[in-house]
């Protein structure tokens, strides 16, 4: 794992000991930030289930104004701190680490709005859906034109009826699926034959 672009380009990231996290691959991370493009500059990002902190660190390296890392595992929190320092991105005004349960955070009143929210919990426990539903119940965490990005295994995905969020795209990279949500009306059911051919992003 490494930082792909920006001020910390090429810096290798330390891994979390053990197998309790799901780090994003460089291929998926690069594809994600190619989609976001220059909009990451000056943006704020909430990195839930942050693990190594790879997504949030990539955002900071590329010019994000602020990233909040939320992680419950003590070893992962230590790894995020180590990676931020290693990349020269440990400015407390730009990088904040919350050692807490992601679900507990989403049940609190929003203290700021984020342009991007990245949800990548451990696989096959339904945690992505729980986080998505909590966020849908408290959409003020997300900026009006913000995105929620869910990272899961393709086999985990199913349409989730939501009131305030709408799935608008999917991108599959091998055994990783990124599902993009934005503010909108209730998400309509997706016919099975359409799941494999999501509409492309515009612009």
Image: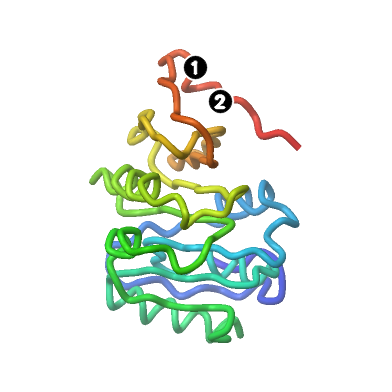
At horizontal 65% and vertical 68% (from top left) the residue drawn is 64
At numbered mark 2, what does the secondary structure look like: helix, strand or loop? loop
Tell me where residue 89 appears, x and y as whole percent: 59, 81
Tell me where residue 102 appears, x and y as whole percent: 32, 62
* Front in this rendered view, residue 129 or 3: 129
Quarter holding residue 21: bottom left
Q: Name the residue under label 1.
A: 194
Tell me where residue 130 appears, x and y as whole percent: 29, 46
Q: Is residue 174 above or below residue 94?
A: above
In space, the residues marked 2 and 1 are separated at their CA atoms by 7 Å
* Front in this rendered view, residue 166 or 5: 166
Q: In this view, does 144 lie above or below 21?
A: above
Tell me where residue 28 appears, x and y as whole percent: 55, 49
At horizontal 61% and vertical 85% (from top left) the residue drawn is 88
* Front in this rendered view, residue 70 or 187: 187
Q: In this view, does 154 lie above or below 144?
A: above
**Residue 55 visible, this orientation:** no
Which quarter of the image is occupied by the C terminus? Answer: top right
At horizontal 30% and vertical 77% (from top left) the residue drawn is 75
Q: Is residue 152 left or right of residue 100?
A: right
At horizontal 61% and vertical 25% (from top left) the residue drawn is 199
Q: Mark 2 points at which residue?
A: 198
Tag 2 and tag 1, C-beta contact below 8 Å: yes
């Amino acid at each position: 794992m490494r930082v792909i672009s920006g001020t910390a380009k090429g810096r290798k990231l330390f891994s979390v000991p053990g197998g309790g996290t799901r780090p994003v691959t460089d291929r998926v991370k690069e594809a994600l930030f190619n989609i976001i493009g220059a909009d990451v500059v000056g943006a704020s990002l909430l990195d839930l289930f942050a693990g190594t902190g790879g997504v949030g660190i990539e955002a900071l390296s590329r010019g994000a104004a602020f990233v909040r890392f939320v992680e419950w595992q003590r070893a992962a929190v230590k790894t995020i701190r180590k990676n931020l320092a290693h990349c020269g991105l440990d400015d407390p005004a730009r990088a904040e680490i919350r050692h807490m349960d992601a679900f507990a955070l989403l049940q609190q009143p929003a203290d700021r709005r984020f342009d991007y929210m990245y949800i990548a919990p451990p696989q096959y426990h339904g945690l992505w859906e729980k986080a998505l539903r909590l966020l849908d119940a408290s959409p003020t965490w997300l900026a009006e034109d913000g995105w929620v990005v869910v990272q899961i295994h393709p086999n985990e995905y199913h349409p989730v009826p939501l009131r305030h969020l709408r799935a608008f795209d999917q991108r599959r990279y091998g055994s990783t699926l990124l599902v993009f949500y934005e503010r909108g009306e209730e998400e309509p059911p997706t016919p099975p034959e359409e799941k494999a051919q999501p509409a492309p992003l515009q612009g």
